[in-house]
Image (tube, grey):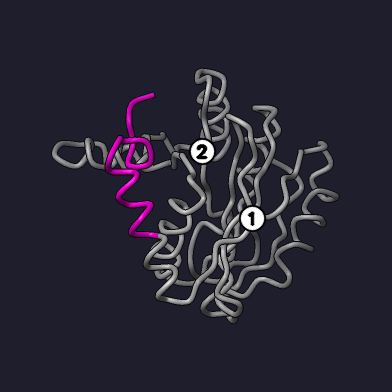
Amino acid sequence: MRYTIFTTPIVKSFLLGVSLFLLKILGWEKVGQLPARIKYVIIVAPHTSNWDVFYGVMLAFALKLDAHFMAKKELFRWPFSPLVEWMGGFPIDRTSSRNVVEQMIQKFNANKKFVLALAPEGTRHKVDYWKSGFYHIAEGAQVPIQLAFIDYASKTGGAGPLIYPSGDIDRDMSAIRGFYLSVKGKHPDQTSPAVVFSKK
């Protein structure tokens, strides 16, 4: 795959230094390490504020994460397409959730190295359920799910456990939910429960 902001020489080193400096002066600490794997889905939760993007990007550089994200295909028009692609975005057709899952599985299969970053809530506003697409993508592509977090209470963020989909989504979500129970978003009242519909 082509260079992104996370892999461009000089740029990545500069932004790593800036990120570590900002995290330090703001009193934040990076926690954990990313897996020594070349393919996985990484989910970040809870997502309750636009500030999550600010801290999330700095933590991504601090962890030396090289991830991609989905973006609606309408963004990939000149002059925005080169910038969105450089940021790690790639276009998807969101005709149906099933279609998106299949597109992502194909993306994993087509690349030797690929990490997909997702916010399972899909919005910073409180919702009743997480979107289950992240789980079905990981299960279909036969890759693990890396849990990542931004905890405003402790001013820490980074990588948690690695979950291997067992096919039993209810059991796996119970483990995922247990991890996020102690993580506090910027606006705790907007935190969405870590539950999904069991069916695709």
* SS of the residue under disc 2: loop
Residue at x-position 51% and y-position 35%: 100
**Numbered disc total:** 2
Which residue appears at 41% of the width and 35% of the height? 92
- In this view, the mark in front (1 or 2): 1
Q: Is residue 14 left or right of residue 154?
A: left
Q: Nearer the viewer, residue 190 or 129?
A: 190
Residue at the spot of label 1: 32
Of the pair 97 and 29, the residue shown nearer to us: 29
- Specify the quadrant of the image occupied by residue 44: bottom right
> In the current view of this chain or complex, which residue is farthest to the left?
79
Whole-number angstrom distance, CA of label 1 to CA of label 2: 35 Å
- Residue 135 figure quarter: top right
Badge 2 is on which residue? 96
Q: Secondary structure at mark 1?
A: loop
Q: Is residue 178 left or right of residue 2?
A: right
Which stretch is magenta? 1-19
In reply to whether residue 69 is colored magenta, the answer given is: no
Q: Is there a contact, CB below 8 Å, between mark 1 and mark 2?
A: no
Q: Give percent across and percent down for residue 163.
A: 75, 44
Verify whether residue 12 appears in magenta.
Answer: yes
Q: Say which residue appears at 49% left-offset and 44% top-offset.
A: 65
Query: Crowding near pointer 1: few (<14 within 10 Å), some, many (20+)?
Result: few
Q: Looking at the picture, does residue 185 appear above or below residue 34?
A: below
Residue 161 horizontal/vertical position (percent): 72, 51
